Amino acid sequence: VQDLIKEGKARHFGLSEPGVNTLRRAHAVQPVSAVQNEYSLWWRAPETNGILAACDELGIGFVPYSPLGKGFLTGAISAETKLEKTDFRATIPRFQPEARAKNLAFVDLLKQVGEARGATPAQVALAWLLAQRPYVVPIPGTTKLHRLEENLGAAVLQLTPEDTLAITAALSSLNAEGDRYNAASMAMTGVEAPPRL
């Protein structure tokens, strides 16, 4: 990648789901511009696994994917929602009916804050991420124009520091039920690069 940048064929270098040691090792060879890891109200591991701390220290942008919990945090999915067999979420433990029923507590929190601020659960979830650090830029996926417009509304939703602290405090008593991926996919996230020979 460093050669491609020197040749002008690429401008920047980023990593997706690295372990913190891999991130530091890569950055020492070629500055990393951005890290793309999952981060949302129901997956906050980047706060404790060293990734956000490394981004703080090294000046690396952070791009949370699945900032809306693969659609769950929008409030559009309930315990009764029937996921099609072709929907990848049907294979994820967190999206099994019993887990979804327990995980609705996250949506209830977002609805409560949203009602007080005139915002949707999705907008509150995205605004909370945007309030974490100035270099956090979530990338919610969408296939519908009205959802894109809704998501853009998060950029103008100004959560107060009190709002952000209240959400974070409420999250301390919530634990997401079920893994974020099936076992095979979990084995590919946060993996450290093998040692140099």
Image: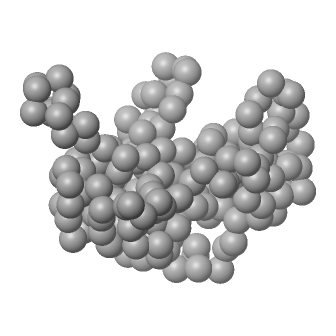
| Residue at the (51%, 32%) spot, across then down | 141
| Residue at the (65%, 61%) spot, across then down | 106
- The one of 97 and 27 positioned closer to us in this rendering: 27
Name, please, the residue furthest toward the front.
197
Q: Is residue 152 above or below residue 166?
A: above
Can the viewer see residue 157? Answer: no
Q: Quadrant of the N terminus?
A: top left
At which x and y percent is residue 192? 48, 61
At which x and y percent is residue 133? 28, 62
| Residue at the (38%, 61%) spot, across then down | 197
| Residue at the (73%, 48%) spot, across then down | 184
Query: Which of the 4 image quadrants contains residue 75?
Result: top right
At which x and y percent is residue 156? 30, 45
136 on left or right of 83: left
108 on left or right of 20: right
At which x and y percent is residue 170? 58, 76
How many numbered marks are there? 0
